Image: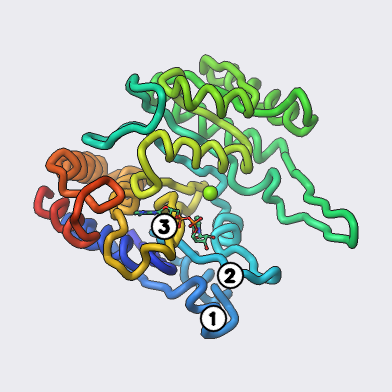
């Protein structure tokens, strides 16, 4: 497998090397290409990513991505949005379940285990925008193709684990949402997946109170983005949440968190989100035994209390990664 590694900025440069040193323990046949992409590069050269970088990435099978600081410049175009589009990574997949020994800050202390499957290439993030003196427009694009493939992906996940599907939308207000919902229902019926639907505002409320009610959630780009961060809070922190961006040909794996300038350079960023992103990559590549072993090692380390300060521990990023490595 060919892997492009993009640590990015801030704590991306700390958690990605930590996750890579864990991955290296498996001695898998992986050819790695490191790329400098992001804010640092943009400051030096005026470009956060080049066409050559994109071509290099397209010669690889998948990407491990840290995080990128967003410059305060209206002309800046998001690298991640570009990568998702160029690689056609239409499904953003984020699993949420409590981890051992992590205090849950939610009202509900029942066990939960759900996956958000978010459409990743269209919706409110279409990039079709206009700003005039007194009015600004963003065009929300929902296509049949985009909705069918995200619903199809969610149904495959639901079928693989015999789960229920929840279709999240705001069809009572937006016609583009009725369009999305109807297509999701069609696809669920065709695949014999049991489904229900929820309005996104009600969903936000219910996820906080009853996360145990949900298994696989499928939704549009912006709604998925927001519900994912809400769900990260349910799990106990951004430093714990991995994600996958998957297309037909390529995939990109990344921790949900950003570059965290407030703690960058201190060596205390929690590497668990990045390490669990590697676990998702191993599963995607079919290395299931290694993925299970990695997950068990992370669980054991959390149980032992060897954690970074965000979880109340006093370990550094490197110490946590080393503790995981020794259990592999
Ligand atoms: P952030 O996720 O970087 O940080 C939010 C809070 O969570 C901070 O207090 C931070 O210290 C903490 N945190 C995040 N990850 C952590 C970890 N692994 N261990 C311990 N604590 C952790 O979000 P923020 O501050 O809104 O954004 C910072 C920069 O990152 C911005 O420039 C933003 O645009 C960018 N960003 C990039 C993303 C990406 O590249 N995928 C995603 C989100 C934000
Ligand atoms: Mg986000």
First in residue order: circle 1 vs circle 2: 1
Determine crowd level at label 1: few under 14, some 14-19, many 20+ residues with C-alpha closer than 10 A: few
The crowd level at tag 3 (other Cα within 10 Å; few <14, some 14-19, many 20+) is: many
Q: Nearer the viewer, mark 3 or mark 1?
A: 1
Name the element at disc 1: helix
Question: Is ligand 1 closer than 8 angstroms to the Cβ of mark 2?
Answer: yes
Residue occupying image coordinates x 22% and y 35%: 101
Q: Which residue is mark 2?
A: 71
Compared to residue 2, the image places residue 194 above or below, namely above
Q: Quadrant of residue 322?
A: bottom left
Residue 45 position by quadrant: bottom right
Q: Which residue is mark 3?
A: 62
The residue lying at 44 percent from left, 32 percent from top is: 115
Residue 90, image x, y percentages: 57, 46
Identify the residue under disc 1. Answer: 43
183 vs 79: above or below:
above
Q: CA distance from mark 3 to mark 1?
A: 26 Å
Front-most of 85 and 177?
A: 177
The foreground one among 50 and 233 is: 233
Q: Quadrant of residue 27?
A: bottom left
Classify mark 2: residues with Cα within 10 Å, few (<14), some (14-19) or many (20+).
Answer: some
């Amino acid at each position: 497998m060919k892997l492009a590694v993009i640590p990015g900025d801030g704590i991306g440069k700390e958690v990605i090397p930590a996750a890579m040193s864990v991955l290296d323990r498996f001695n898998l046949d992986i050819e790695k290409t490191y790329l400098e992409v992001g804010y640092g590069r943009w400051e030096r050269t005026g470009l956060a990513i080049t066409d050559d970088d994109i071509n290099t990435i397209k010669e690889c099978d998948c990407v491990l991505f840290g995080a990128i600081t967003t410059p305060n410049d209206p002309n800046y175009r998001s690298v991640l949005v570009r990568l998702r589009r160029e690689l056609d990574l239409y499904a953003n997949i984020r699993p949420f379940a409590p981890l051992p020994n992590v205090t849950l800050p939610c009202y509900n202390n029942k066990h939960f285990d759900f996956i958000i499957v978010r459409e990743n290439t269209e919706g409110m993030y279409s990039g079709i925008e206009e700003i005039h003196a007194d009015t600004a427009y963003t065009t929300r694009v929902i296509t049949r193709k985009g909705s069918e493939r995200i619903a199809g992906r969610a149904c495959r996940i639901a079928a693989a684990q015999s789960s229920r599907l929840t279709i999240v939308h705001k069809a009572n207000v937006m016609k583009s949402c009725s369009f999305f919902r109807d297509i999701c229902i069609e696809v669920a019926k065709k695949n014999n997946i049991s489904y229900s639907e929820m309005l996104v505002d009600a969903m936000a409320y219910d996820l906080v109170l009853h996360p145990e009610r949900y298994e696989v959630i499928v939704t549009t780009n912006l709604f998925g983005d927001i519900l994912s961060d809400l769900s990260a809070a349910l799990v106990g922190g951004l430093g714990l949440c991995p994600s996958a961006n998957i297309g037909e040909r390529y995939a990109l794996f990344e921790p949900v968190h950003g570059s965290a300038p407030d703690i960058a350079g201190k060596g205390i960023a929690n590497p668990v989100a990045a390490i669990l992103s590697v676990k998702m990559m191993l599963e995607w590549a079919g290395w299931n035994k290694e993925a299970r072993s990695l997950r068990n090692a992370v669980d054991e380390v959390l149980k032992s209390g060897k954690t970074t300060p965000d979880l109340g521990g006093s370990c550094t990023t490197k110490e946590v990664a080393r503790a995981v490595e020794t259990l592999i």
